[in-house]
Image: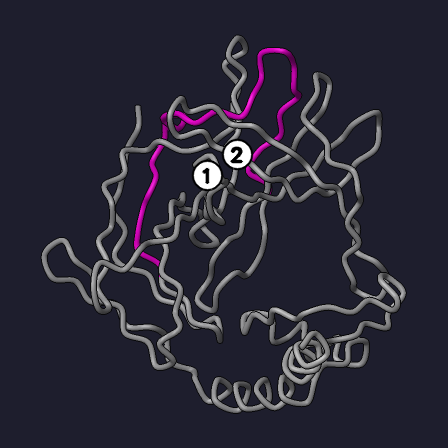
């Protein structure tokens, strides 16, 4: 029975990897249609099963012809999202305005309330940012919610730059938000982009320390999607500086429903303005 099970897995989603980062690695492939470009670029480094390859080829043919953005319509407090593929992700986004386009500071997945209908929760301007409680200095950050932990904490990811002991490192950070008391724990995983374009993550998991200089980055959206990343701010950490969940610093913010399909065609509802003083 075990041999039959292994054979079934190999026929469907098994892959082997032959690049220098993880040589002779084998496993079950969980493919995201959003990573089509990476799949095409790295095809010579990864061999996958015939059945899985046929599925990807068929999916590619279908989605390559999809250049239509998801449709968003509103009736009362409810939004309806229509997508050719039926696979669009729908989120509530929080952003600030800039001359280059909307700068995202937050992204939360929305649950469908029935059929293709969604309700956009009211937002009063509470989100995660970095704040010095004694200095009054603060920096916005971009945080995208990716799910929940077993104890109910929200898990969000963000891009940070960390300068420690004179060395600057790019980091993918995970933020654990306790929704009951509003506390945020941050863990940073440094990485580097290799000459061949691969991303190599360090095994280190770092927590912010006094003396660290942290730079927060956020995506800037244009007519065709993410067109650039920008620095939101830089803060030097001390004993009184922390990631917090609270009302954002004074300013003008926006929230909207955002729908994106797996060809990265996207659409956004008319944003609602929130002014914090």
Residue 224 drawn above or below residue 91: below
Measured Cα–Cα span from mark 1 to mark 2: 6 Å
Residue 213 drawn above or below residue 152: above
Residue 272 bears which disc, if any? none
What quarter of the picture does the C terminus occupy?
A: top left
**Residue shown at 24%/68% (left/top)?**
116
Q: Position of residue 210 (x, y in %)?
A: 70, 16
| Viewer-nearest residue: 27 or 44 | 27
Residue 109 falls left or right of residue 3:
left
CB atoms of marks 1 and 2 within 8 Å: yes
| Viewer-nearest residue: 16 or 139 | 16
Residue 233 magenta: yes
| Viewer-nearest residue: 176 or 102 | 176
| Viewer-nearest residue: 11 or 156 | 11
Q: Position of residue 34 (x, y in %)?
A: 54, 70
The rendered magenta stretch, by its main secondary structure, is classed as strand
- The residue furthest left is 76
Residue 71 drawn above or below residue 75: below
- The residue furthest front is 1
> According to the image, label 1 marks what residue?
154
Q: Which residues are magenta?
A: 231-258
What quarter of the picture does the N terminus occupy?
A: bottom right
Residue 132 drawn above or below residue 152: above
How many residues crowd around disc 2 within 10 Å: few (fewer than 14), some, or many (20 or more)? many
Residue 176 bears which disc, if any? 2
Total labels: the figure holds 2
Q: Position of residue 253 (x, y in %)?
A: 34, 39
Mark 1 lies on a secondary structure that is: strand
Residue 18 falls left or right of residue 176:
right
**Residue shown at 40%/21% (left/top)?**
181
């Amino acid at each position: 029975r075990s041999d039959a099970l292994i054979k079934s897995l190999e026929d469907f989603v098994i892959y082997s990897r032959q690049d220098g980062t993880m040589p002779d690695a084998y496993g079950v492939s969980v493919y995201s249609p959003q990573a089509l470009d990476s799949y095409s670029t790295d095809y010579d480094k990864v061999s996958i099963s015939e059945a899985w390859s046929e599925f990807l080829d068929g999916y590619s043919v279908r989605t390559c012809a999809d250049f239509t953005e998801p449709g968003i319509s509103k009736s009362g407090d409810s939004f309806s999202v229509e997508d050719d593929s039926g696979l669009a992700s729908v989120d509530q986004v929080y952003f600030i305005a800039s001359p280059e386009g909307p700068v995202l500071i937050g992204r939360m997945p929305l649950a469908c309330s029935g059929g293709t209908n969604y309700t956009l929760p009211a937002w009063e301007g509470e989100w995660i940012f970095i704040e010095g409680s004694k200095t009054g200095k603060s920096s916005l950050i971009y945080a995208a919610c990716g799910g929940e932990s077993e104890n109910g904490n929200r898990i969000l990811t963000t891009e940070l730059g960390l300068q420690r002991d004179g060395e600057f490192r790019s980091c993918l950070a995970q933020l654990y938000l306790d929704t009951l008391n509003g506390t945020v724990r941050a863990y940073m995983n440094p990485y580097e982009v290799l000459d061949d374009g691969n991303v190599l993550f360090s095994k280190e998991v770092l927590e912010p320390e006094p003396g660290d200089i942290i730079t927060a980055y956020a995506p800037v959206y244009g007519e065709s999607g993410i067109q650039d990343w920008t620095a939101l701010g830089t803060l030097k950490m001390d004993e009184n500086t922390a990631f917090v969940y609270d009302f954002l610093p004074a300013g003008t913010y926006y929230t909207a429903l955002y729908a994106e399909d797996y060809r990265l065609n996207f659409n956004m509802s008319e944003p609602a303005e929130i002014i914090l003083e």
